Image (cartoon, rainbow, N blue to C red):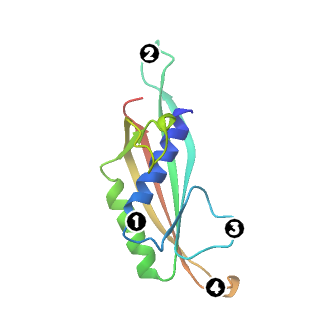
Amino acid sequence: MYIERKEELSVYYFIEGLFTDATYIKIVDAFPEELLTIPTVAIEGGPLMTRLFEIGNSDRVRSRQWIIDIFAKNKTQRDEIGYRIMNAIKPGIPTYNYDEGFPPAVTPSALGHLEVLKIDYKPIRIIPELVETLYHRATLLFVAQNTTV
């Protein structure tokens, strides 16, 4: 499995673990394309960016933007979900070797750490006339860099 996929899974399981006390919140690994269940948190790995960091070396420093879409019943629920995620990711996200297996059956070994470089929280207006069921939405964008790979 590629390191990028291991990072995607690490972010997914990290966010999922934040809501073990709120099992009514659906956590999904991509933007939802099926009938939307409210509340839902959708996690998607966005653009990967690389840059050279040492003269004469072809290795690159890699960072990635992560897109977390939040769909909630009301403004308070939307913001509570967003703020919980935003505050939890500030210190970074540990990455794991999912070649060894997946939780809860297996606890994979630590692989690295995603250092969060930037966080943006953006509420998105929903026009009631355009949606069948009124809901509230936000997008949390963050940029992270794996400090150990």
| Mark 4 or 1, closer to the camera | 1
Q: Check the image and name the residue furthest to the bottom.
A: 129
Please name the residue that numbered disc 4 is placed on. Answer: 133
Is the C-beta separation of discs 4 and 1 under 8 Å?
A: no
- Mark 4 and mark 3 lie on one chain; the one further toward the N terminus is 3
Badge 4 vs badge 3, beta-carbon distance below 8 Å: no
Residue 109, x across and y down, in percent: 38, 36
Secondary structure at numbered mark 3: loop
The first of marks 4 and 1 along the sequence is 1
Q: Residue at x 70, y 83 (%)?
A: 130
Residue 35 in the image: state x and y as whole percent.
68, 73
Left or right: 24, with 46 as reference point? left
Read off the residue under disc 2.
55
For label 2, the crowd category at 10 Å Cα-Cα, with few meaning under 14, some 14 to 19 and many 20 or more, is few
Q: Quadrant of the N terminus?
A: top right
Q: Are marks 3 and 2 in contact (CB under 8 Å)?
A: no
Q: Nearer the viewer, residue 100 or 122?
A: 100
Front position among marks 1 and 2: 1
Residue count near mark 3 (Cα–Cα under 10 Å), binned few <14, some 14–19, many ≥20: few
Q: Which mark is in front, 4 or 2?
A: 4
Mark found first going from the N terminus, 1 or 2: 1
Q: Regarding mark 1 in the picture, which secondary structure is present there?
A: loop
Kind of residue at disc 1: Phe
Q: Looking at the picture, how far across and down is residue 5, in whole percent?
A: 55, 40
Separation of marks 3 and 2 at Cα, in angstroms: 48 Å
Farthest residue to the front: give it.
105
Q: CA distance from mark 4 to mark 1?
A: 24 Å
**Where residue 75 sits in the image (x, y, percent)?**
45, 81
> Is residue 90 depicted above or below 129 in this figure?
above
Label 1 packing within 10 angstroms: few (<14), some (14-19), many (20+): some
Which mark, by number, is residue 19? 1
